Image (cartoon, rainbow, N blue to C red):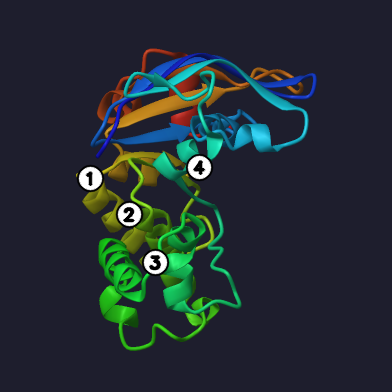
Amino acid sequence: MSKRIQATNVGAYFGQLKAVEDITLTIEPMQVTALIGPSGCGKTTFIRTINRMHEVVPGARVEGSVHIDGEDIYGPGVDPVAVRRLVGMVFQRPNPFPTMSIYDNAAAGLKINGVKGRANLDDVVERSLHLAGLWDEVRTRLGKPGASLSGGQQQRLCIARALAVEPSVILMDEPCSALDPISTLRIEDLIRELKDRYTIVIVTHNMQQAARVSDTTAFLHVEGAGQPGKLVEFGPTPKIFTKPDDPRTEGYITGRFG
């Protein structure tokens, strides 16, 4: 299920503004890859090129190529909706549909993709809530609003919603930034559990979190206002955090800038 991602010379634009430039890296399956770097260096923009969400913005475009297990997701005839089913995304703030029940939140993607039949939905909803570590907490109140859950539970519900459509890749954009420390640790535990089944890419400003959960780390940097973000260094997380090759990486990790 887990898949390899190969980004080659990826650049992303908002109109004439180039947000990221010439990013080339390989994200291995069954690993967690962290993207770190100062605000405005293009981390979120880059991960949105991996599931073709970047192009949803009017005037936005992508150059270079992104291959998932050898298939160019920007190739002729490739359906962006199919790519987004393959590559799920969890956002910075928990965003359950407020008027929907816990059950309907978990099943939302399935219904959009045409899955019918209560028995089929029940099975997948229960499985995805189990995978998200939430089933035991909500099994007796699936009819309650998703918004009635705590912040950490809402984020795990959003993860369950993403898992329900059986993606191969999960992108997480600052998934813990709005959560308390206990909820953050629960999400980090969940990330470690899920990497046996999925390729996971996480954007984080939390250096300790990147060190705790990731196998590999990519450091992006921007030289100045109006300049595109660029990949400075990419490698095993222990090396990036203890013996980086580039002084800019060391400066960011040690807090001297950023």
In space, the residues marked 1 and 4 are separated at their CA atoms by: 25 Å
Looking at numbered disc 3 in the image, what kind of residue is underneath it? Ser
At x 42%, y 54%, the residue is 162
Q: Position of residue 145 (x, y in %)?
A: 52, 82
Mark 2 nearby-residue class (10 Å; few <14, some 14–19, many ≥20): some
Looking at numbered disc 4 in the image, what kind of residue is underneath it? His
In space, the residues marked 4 and 2 are separated at their CA atoms by: 14 Å
Report whether 212 appears left or right of 152: left
Q: Earlier in the sequence, mark 2 or mark 3?
A: 3
In space, the residues marked 3 and 4 are separated at their CA atoms by: 17 Å
Mark toward the viewer: 2 or 1? 1
Residue 205 has which mark?
4
Please name the residue that numbered disc 1 is placed on.
197
Please, what secondary structure does the residue beneath circle 1 have?
Answer: loop
Mark toward the viewer: 1 or 4? 1
| Nearest to the observer: residue 104 or residue 201 | 104
Q: Position of residue 179 (x, y in %)?
A: 48, 64
In space, the residues marked 2 and 3 are separated at their CA atoms by: 9 Å
In space, the residues marked 2 and 1 are separated at their CA atoms by: 15 Å
Q: Earlier in the sequence, mark 1 or mark 3?
A: 3
Q: Dividing the image into 4 quarters, which one contains the C terminus? A: top right
| Nearest to the observer: residue 139 or residue 78 | 78
Mark 1 nearby-residue class (10 Å; few <14, some 14–19, many ≥20): some
Mark toward the viewer: 1 or 3? 1
Q: Position of residue 203 (x, y in %)?
A: 47, 40
Please name the residue that numbered disc 2 is placed on.
188
Q: Is residue 254 visible?
A: no
Please name the residue that numbered disc 3 is placed on.
183
